[in-house]
Image (cartoon, helix red, strand yellow):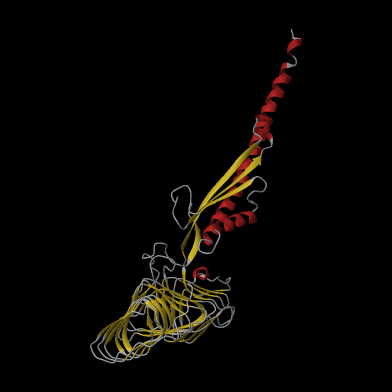
Amino acid sequence: MKRRGEEGQALVVVAGGLTVLLLAAGIGVDIGYLRYQKRCIQAAADSAAIAGAAEINYGDVTQAAQTDSATNGYTNGSNNVTVTVYNPPNDGPHAGVSGYVEVLVSKVQPTFFAKVAGFNNVTVTARAVAYAGSGQGCIYALAPTGTGVLMNGGTNITSQCGVYINSNSSQALLMNGTNTLDDRFTDIVGGDLLNGSNTTNPTPTTGIVASSDPLAYLDNSEPSISTPCSGGSTYPAINGTGANVTITPGSNCYSVTINGSNNTVTLNPGNYGSVTVNGTGNNVTLGAGIYGNVLINGSGTLTFGPGQYSSITGNGTPNEIFNPGLYVISSGNVILNGTNGMSGTGVTFYLGPNAGGITVNGSDTTSLSAPTSGTYAGILFFQNPSDTSNATFNGSNGTVWNGAIYLPKAQVTMNGSNSSSAQYTILVANNLVLNGTDTFNDNYSSLAQGSPIKTATLGE
């Protein structure tokens, strides 16, 4: 016999089952959508961390990261979005490590069907860490037009890193004669013209997007320039032989001339006018300070202290030694003839906006190395962008330029043999003329932060 009281139970069970199924399906939709949002937020966090790391040497890391996140649809403080930036990171294996940037992007995401179960919204968070690592390039020709790199005769360039040429000319890279360019890569905005029996390994890539100035951040750390003393007295000329003289300027403004031979002359730290060395075999020490024009016509040993110099001209045959520190050239040229040797460890030469050009003639015992730490870590020569005076580096087999040569608006000519035994050599200029045999290594192990040229890379 059929029981009428049980006729509706099946409908109740079916209805309840459908409700559970619909709720499960709805929660599945929510979970899928939240996963999609997670992927989008992770992509924004990754991009923001890279943008922040790229800004480490230039300005506001937080602003750069948050601006980048906004371009990807996640604006800090808008639409329940929070973008938090830590420089250095606040958490993880790189917590507190300089050169790294951590970004957290969070968004409070409303749910759809999960509200039935009491979940009105869910906070979705993504984390990314990026760092400013060593760039792959070490030769940059920044000129937008004309020939960026010119190689003549039997030039042989060996580079462990890459070459960037920004010129849009069809002859952006011009090789005349029998030349070899062997590097990691050669990227050219324009084209290349090879006249003669030339070898490029690998084949240059043309039609690339122009590279930005990789050391432009140095413009934010240019040293101040003082006025050298003038109108003072001239210290009595040193004309004797074998004398031992120490000069302390005090409140005086001495100009000093050394004409004798085999003298030992020490200029204690201070503010001086011009210094001229004409004698032979003199041992002269210039203490840290401010100097007018320094002219060397003689021989012997000349030891420089860090400071400011109106100009440095070496026409004689001295052994030139540069003590560690910053050398600011304010108004003239730097002409260094290391015929009998030239050395300096931990040195940076800065040419101000009113300075002239650079001519450095190295010998087999010439070795100049940049600092390994501090503001100018890795920077050997640094020319203010307002100074367009050209530079020439003439080396021989043992010449070492260990550091970055940064002359963004000048032509740099390298003749002879340069830097074969340097740990690293970086060359950034308006345009380059390369004649001879030059080697560019990329061993940055002496620099705690790696190459001064950075590229932002995702680390976590």
Percent x, y for residue 188? 54, 75
- What x and y, as percent, mark residue 61? 54, 58
Please indicate, yes or no, whether residue 435 appears anywhere in the rendered image. Answer: no
Q: Residue furthest top?
A: 1
> Closest to the observer: 177 or 327?
327
Closer to us: 21 or 266: 266
Seen at 40% across and 86% down, the residue is 274
Q: Position of residue 374 (x, y in %)?
A: 41, 65
**For residue 106, which quarter of the picture?**
top right
Screen quadrant of the N terminus: top right
The answer to whether residue 71 is above or below residue 29 is below
Q: Which residue is farthest left? A: 242
Residue drawn at x 73%, y 12% is 6
Out of 315 and 132, give the one closest to the viewer.
Answer: 315
Q: Is residue 42 visible?
A: yes
Residue sitting farthest toward the right: 4
Residue 385 location (% of width, % of height): 53, 77
In this rendering, is residue 282 above or below 92? below
